[in-house]
Image (cartoon, rainbow, N blue to C red):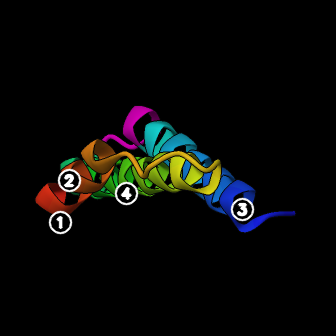
Amino acid sequence: MSTALLFWLAGSGLIGLSVYGLIVNPHPLMKLLALNLLGSGVFLLFGVIARRGAAAGLGGDPMPQALVITGI
């Protein structure tokens, strides 16, 4: 298992867990924490997408990297 696949699965798991938390939990604080977790999962997937392009021999795509840096 490559590291890119591992990070891809982790990001997808974070997004799935946070969407489940948004749907199931009625408390506003839990919904806010689920949204924070969703953002972390999306940032992780953006990082994987940027890294995957650079690993394929292409120039690294700077757009996902800029979005992650701006979001942080």
Residue 54 in the image: x percent, y percent?
52, 54
Tell me how far mark 1 sits from mark 2, CA to CA.
10 Å
Relative vertical location of residue 49 with respect to residue 54 in this rendering, above or below:
above
User: Looking at the image, which is closer to me, 52 or 13?
Assistant: 52
Label located before the other in sequence (4 or 2): 4
Q: Give the numbered dot on residue 6.
A: 3
Q: Give the numbered dot on residue 37.
A: 4
Residue drawn at point x = 44 percent, y = 49 percent: 59
Label located before the other in sequence (1 or 3): 3
The magenta segment is 22-26
Amino acid residing under circle 1: Ile
User: Looking at the image, which is closer to me, 3 or 57?
Assistant: 57
Relative vertical location of residue 19 with respect to residue 44 in this rendering, above or below:
above
Query: Quarter of the image holding residue 25?
Result: top left
Tell me how far mark 4 sits from mark 2, CA to CA.
20 Å
Tell me how far mark 1 sits from mark 4, CA to CA.
13 Å
Disc 1: which residue = 72
Between tags 4 and 2, which lies in front?
A: 2
Q: Are marks 3 and 2 in contact (CB under 8 Å)?
A: no
Asked whether residue 25 is drawn in magenta, I would say yes
Image quarter hosting the N terminus: bottom right
